[in-house]
Image (cartoon, rainbow, N blue to C red):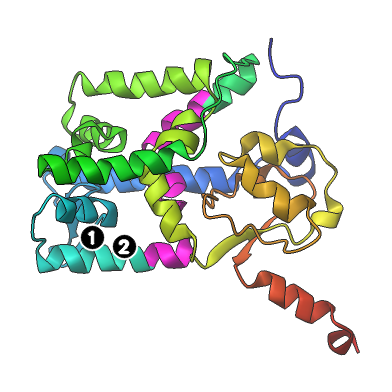
Amino acid sequence: MAELHPVGVEAIDKKGWWKAHQWLILRRLSQLSILGLFLLGPVFGVWFVKGNLASSLTLDILPLTDPYVLLQTIAAGAKPLSTALIGAAIVTVFYILVGGRSYCSWVCPVNIVTDAASWLRRKLGIKGSGTVIDKNVRYWLLAVTFIVAFITQSVAWELVNPVSILHRGIIFSIGMGWSVILFIFLFDLLISNRAWCGRLCPVGAFYSVIGTVSQLRITADNREACNDCMDCFQVCPEPQVIRPALKGSGNPVITAANCTNCARCIDVCSEDVFHISTRYADKIIIKNSSPEAQS
């Protein structure tokens, strides 16, 4: 059975196709551009970026290191290089500013796979097996990756990390690694919607920890215009983060650490309920609506 209410149709009718897809398109351009930069070296011999998503060097000057990988390295007993520490600090500060889980929606190549599974699931009206995985499982798996690194004295998780596997697969064409990606696609499609990114992935769990203090936020500052179409809940990879801001009486800012700042809620909302702002937007709204400000 196909979906009864095609998501985003009202937004397309009211805002036009581009405005109803602009953030999705920009995200795809971001993800593909990052992959493209890494491909320039192996394919064309132009080494603009050397390395991978775990650790890279841009223009032989700028080091970037995944802080999650760095912490696993330290847990494994290795002493990181100063460039790795600098690279991790740069990445951490960046995601504190733009949102920890922005990594998941704007950088991670697996996001394209899971988004495709979710889209096809809606189009085909697949309900799945009803399997519900506790959203906190990813945090347990995050802890396990550090424990395994300590026990094995190696960054063992990176050998099976789907993000690393897909990135290596695209660049170096590793054969059997694609089976892991296919499994994630089919699991999300047939068993449990957005199970990998929303329930299991320890990488996303790690970046959500950074996301607790991140500055860039989505805000439902026009929530009084909401017509309850539920399209935002349908497309959001973490729909539980929307309700407090949209339906609550308090802060209209989505402050939940697991918001990925994908901005699809902005795309599909025909009433322009959502906007990109900062975590302090609620204070600005309150200030501007005060009697003193209106006098």
Report whether residue 32 is seen.
no
Q: Label for residue 149?
A: none
Residue 134 place in picture, x, y as percent: 52, 33
Question: In this rendering, is residue 53 above or below 127?
Answer: below
Report whether residue 188 is seen.
yes
Q: Quadrant of the N terminus?
A: top right
Q: Quadrant of the C terminus?
A: bottom right
**Where, by quadrant of the figure, is residue 276 drawn?**
bottom right
Q: Main secondary structure of the magenta part?
A: helix
Residue located at (17% from left, 38% from top)? 156
**Relative horizontal placement of residue 73, taking residue 129 as reference (left or right):** left
What range is drawn magenta here?
A: 94-117
Q: Amino acid at mark 1?
A: Leu
Gap in angstroms between the C-alphas marked 2 and 1: 6 Å
Residue 71 place in picture, x, y as percent: 23, 55
Q: Which residue is mark 2?
A: 91
**Relative horizontal placement of residue 271, taking residue 240 as reference (left or right):** right
